[in-house]
Image (spheres, rainbow, N blue to C red):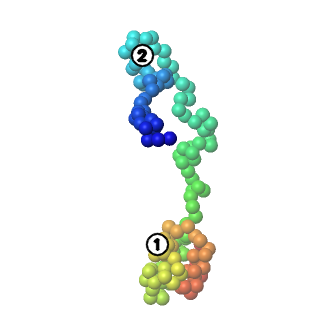
Amino acid sequence: MSYFDQDWKPVVFTKTGFNNKPLTGEAALKAAARSGAQLDTHKREQGGKNKQNSGSSHSGNYKLDNETDALKHNRISKESSQAVVKARIAKGMTQVQLAAAIFESVTTVQTYENGTAIPNGNILGKLSRALGVTIRK
């Protein structure tokens, strides 16, 4: 095959025709109204909603609306959090030093001291050993 035998015409890609999909939704209503066609609309009974959970007692919204104390996480007791603070101060440690001693973050020590921590047996054990006190959940 030589240089002159090759096809050197450029290839041009173009769109082919219009998309013949039927219009749906608001665009279809507007197009039909412009053309003067008779419109027939109806609202679906459960349009766009999950039929499985609507109005049932298993719905997530139902659980949130009727939340009780039973659905809350257990927190460390106020007495335990105060015991951690008192023991740390008695040892002359800062929160940063205590966190370094138990190999945890400062935020973890802060949550145990302010009573918002979810009790973890491993961390409670580390705190007990580092401070020399027994800490209960």
> How many numbered marks are there?
2
Q: Residue at x 59, y 55 (%)?
A: 71
Q: Nearer the viewer, residue 95 or 134?
A: 95
Q: Is residue 89 visible?
A: no
Q: Nearer the viewer, residue 100 or 92?
A: 100
Quadrant, the C terminus: bottom right
**Callouts 1 and 2 close, C-beta under 8 Å:** no
Location of residue 62 in the rendering, given as x and y in whole percent from the top left corner? 56, 43
Element type at marker 2? helix
Q: Residue at x 60, y 56 (%)?
A: 70
Type of the residue with mark 2 = Ala
Disc 2 crowd, CA 10 A, few/some/many (<14, 14-19, 20+): some
Q: Nearer the viewer, residue 73 or 69?
A: 73
Residue at label 2? 32
Location of residue 58 in the rendering, given as x and y in whole percent from the top left corner? 62, 43
Type of the residue with mark 1 = Thr
- In the rendered image, the vertical position of residue 5 relative to residue 115, given as above or below: above
Residue at label 1? 107
Disc 1 crowd, CA 10 A, few/some/many (<14, 14-19, 20+): few
- In the rendered image, the vertical position of residue 56 relative to residue 81, given as above or below: above
- In the rendered image, the vertical position of residue 72 relative to residue 60, given as above or below: below
Q: Is residue 30 visible?
A: yes
Q: Quadrant of residue 38?
A: top left
Q: Earlier in the sequence, mark 1 or mark 2?
A: 2
